[in-house]
Amino acid sequence: MTVVASYLYRHGHRVREVALGEHVDCPADRLQFIWIGLCDPCADEIALLKELYGLHPLAVEDALRDGQLPKVDVHGEQLFVIARTATLEGGTIDYGQTAIFVGHSHIITVRQGSDRSHQPLRDQLEAAPILLGQGVDYVLHAVLDFVVDGYLPIVQSIEDEVLAMEGRILDAFLERHEVARIFTLRRELIRFQRILVPMEEMARKLARSQLPCIDPEARAYFSDVFDHVRRVETMVDGLREVLSSVFEFSSLMEQQRTGDITRQLAAWAAILAVPTAIAGIYGMNFDVMPELRWKYGYFMVLSVIAVTCGVLYRRFRRVRWL
């Protein structure tokens, strides 16, 4: 069943359930309205609501088509709003869509691709009917605020993962899968920003423009939604910079450790070159080599090798190559 909830409200209190095809005459005082919640509806159900509430055909078409960018459109005395929901699943961000039809006496929410039900929000508003009694514009604010509040846990979860990855850099090289994860997160954040920018524009328009069905006193609430979106967008920008810094810092650390290993190998190669050179000289098998017949020649050569290697070792230790 795609109809999640359909109720008539008066003065902020639920009056009764309303059938999907039922026509209810509501006064123009904004104190009585119908709130219908749909989830993945079929075309026939939307067509029924279109005829009953005079929904614009283009808005109905957009509501049935998933993947729309956030926006707010004005159709006569009605508003059509699209917001994008987001959830973090399996390390990637999955997106859904919530289309909202707003009239003076009705608000219709159409969810697609989102498992986050509006029922907790509806229960919260019904438990404190002061704002609910103000009209459909306050319900619109509550729905948008509910959607935007779902963004913050995503950013915080990614932030914790990035900070943990940043801490591991000091102890060991990043593994291949960790480097791949950095690029995956960066790609997900770029996609997320493509949603946040139009969400910000939509919230700004609701907060600062004169629109039908929006009371001037309600604009402050949409300004709060606008601030929340900007806060998330700022956090996403910061995370992208941190991800770039993590990758660059990891590369620098790897280069530094590679340089340390190269210097150590070069130092040991220089030390070992001394006995190798001396042994090579005395291994040429010439007959005229007086040192070969000297009684202490062997011990002298070993002493020269030991002293020279010791001096080189101390010098390399002093310059921290070993």
Image (cartoon, rainbow, N blue to C red):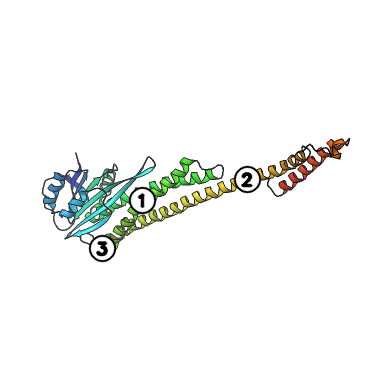
Question: In the image, what residue occupies the spot 22% across and 52% down?
Answer: 100
Tag 3: amino acid: Pro
Quarter of the picture containing the N terminus is: top left
292 left or right, relative to 14? right
Local SS, label 2: helix
User: Tag 3 or tag 1, which sits nearer the N-term?
Assistant: 1
Residue tagged 2: 262
Which of 85 and 131 lies nearest the eye of the viewer?
85
Residue tagged 1: 192
Q: Residues within 10 Å of mark 1 (few under 14, many from 20)?
A: some
**Residue 312 can be seen in this image:** yes
User: Tag 2 or tag 3, which sits nearer the N-term?
Assistant: 3
Q: Quadrant of residue 44?
A: top left
Tag 1: amino acid: Phe
Q: Position of residue 279 (x, y in %)?
A: 76, 38
Residue tagged 3: 216
64 left or right, relative to 274? left
Local SS, label 3: helix
Q: Residues within 10 Å of mark 2 (few under 14, many from 20)?
A: few
Q: Residues within 10 Å of mark 3 (few under 14, many from 20)?
A: few
Question: In the image, what residue occupies the spot 71% across and 47% down?
Answer: 316
**Looking at the picture, does residue 187 appear above or below residue 282?**
below
Q: Position of residue 156 (x, y in %)?
A: 42, 47
Which of 139 and 237 lies nearest the eye of the viewer?
237
Q: What distance separates the C-alpha of mark 3 from that of mark 2? A: 69 Å
Which of 80 and 20 lies nearest the eye of the viewer?
80
Q: What distance separates the C-alpha of mark 1 from that of mark 2? A: 42 Å
74 left or right, relative to 153? left
